Image (cartoon, helix red, strand yellow):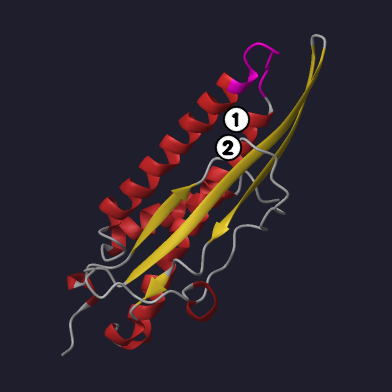
Amino acid sequence: MTRSLKNLSIGFGILSILLFSAFNTQEPTVFPTQINWRTHFLAEPDEHSSFYALTATRWHYSYNASVMGNDLHINFKFSGGVDPDQSWVKLNQLKGAESKRKLLNHEQGHVNINFLLLKDGEQKIRFQRYSVKNYKKYIQENANKVSAYYRDMQKRYDEETKHGSDDPNQERWNRLIETELKKYIK
């Protein structure tokens, strides 16, 4: 049975935001990762889902603070990326190379939004003034704000593009994301 791409409810990304306040030795992932079906979608598809793909992304921040008197020194680490063991695709249900290309492009948008979260989160958390009395509270508040903003962006991206099946809105989002990426990629 052949269905047009317009009638498909195409994949969505999931933004798994993991916030750690303990020191994390994980090395940061290089972004934005260019995804492909074989490397980044290793999980078994959810056969009960009406979607054709799920891109699980993650964002981590951690810090190590040292206090000597009134002097505060904070070392931050930030990382993010695609979680291939949680990401899946139903390639056998997609008809033709163009459907697969469009879906991968849409899922790449989720990855790129996650990159924006990583870079913007780093800016909004690392480069703030903190004091010995307030740093834990304000680091958490800053992280929560940036997380909520990009979680909402991921949701709007799926809604407005109809999970990649609304070509004009997908193209509009592609341009918007590309403009934002240029702020961080030299």
Asked if residue 130 is among those painted magenta in the image, a careful observer would answer: yes
- The residue located at (56%, 20%) in the rendering is 137
The majority secondary structure of the magenta stretch comes to: loop
**Range of the magenta residues?**
128-136
Taking 45 as reference, is 162 left or right?
A: left
Q: Nearer the viewer, residue 142 or 18?
A: 18
User: Residue 77 in the image: x percent, y percent?
Assistant: 70, 42
Q: Nearer the viewer, residue 90 or 104?
A: 90
Q: Say few, some or many: other residues with alpha carbon within 10 Å of mark 1 (under 14 / 14 to 19 / 20 or more).
A: some
- The residue located at (49%, 69%) in the rendering is 85
Label number found at residue 124: 1
Provide the secondary structure element on which disc 2 rests. Answer: helix
Which residue bears the numbered disc 2? 121
User: Residue 102 in the image: x percent, y percent?
Assistant: 37, 72
Q: CA distance from mark 2 to mark 1?
A: 5 Å
Q: Can residue 128 be seen here?
A: yes
Residue 20 drawn above or below residue 12: above
Q: Say few, some or many: other residues with alpha carbon within 10 Å of mark 2 (under 14 / 14 to 19 / 20 or more).
A: many
Q: Amino acid at mark 2?
A: Gly
- Point out the residue furthest to the bottom here: 1
User: Residue 80 in the image: x percent, y percent?
Assistant: 59, 52
Residue 128 drawn above or below residue 4: above
Residue 164 drawn above or below residue 160: below
Q: Amino acid at mark 1?
A: Lys
- The residue located at (69%, 35%) in the rendering is 63
Q: Can residue 178 be seen here?
A: no
Asked if residue 6 is among those painted magenta in the image, a careful observer would answer: no
Specify the quadrant of the image occupied by residue 168: bottom left
Q: Nearer the viewer, residue 166 or 62?
A: 62
Provide the secondary structure element on which disc 1 rests. Answer: helix
Asked if disc 2 and disc 1 are in contact, CB closer than 8 Å, the reply is yes
Taking 126 as reference, is 175 left or right?
A: left
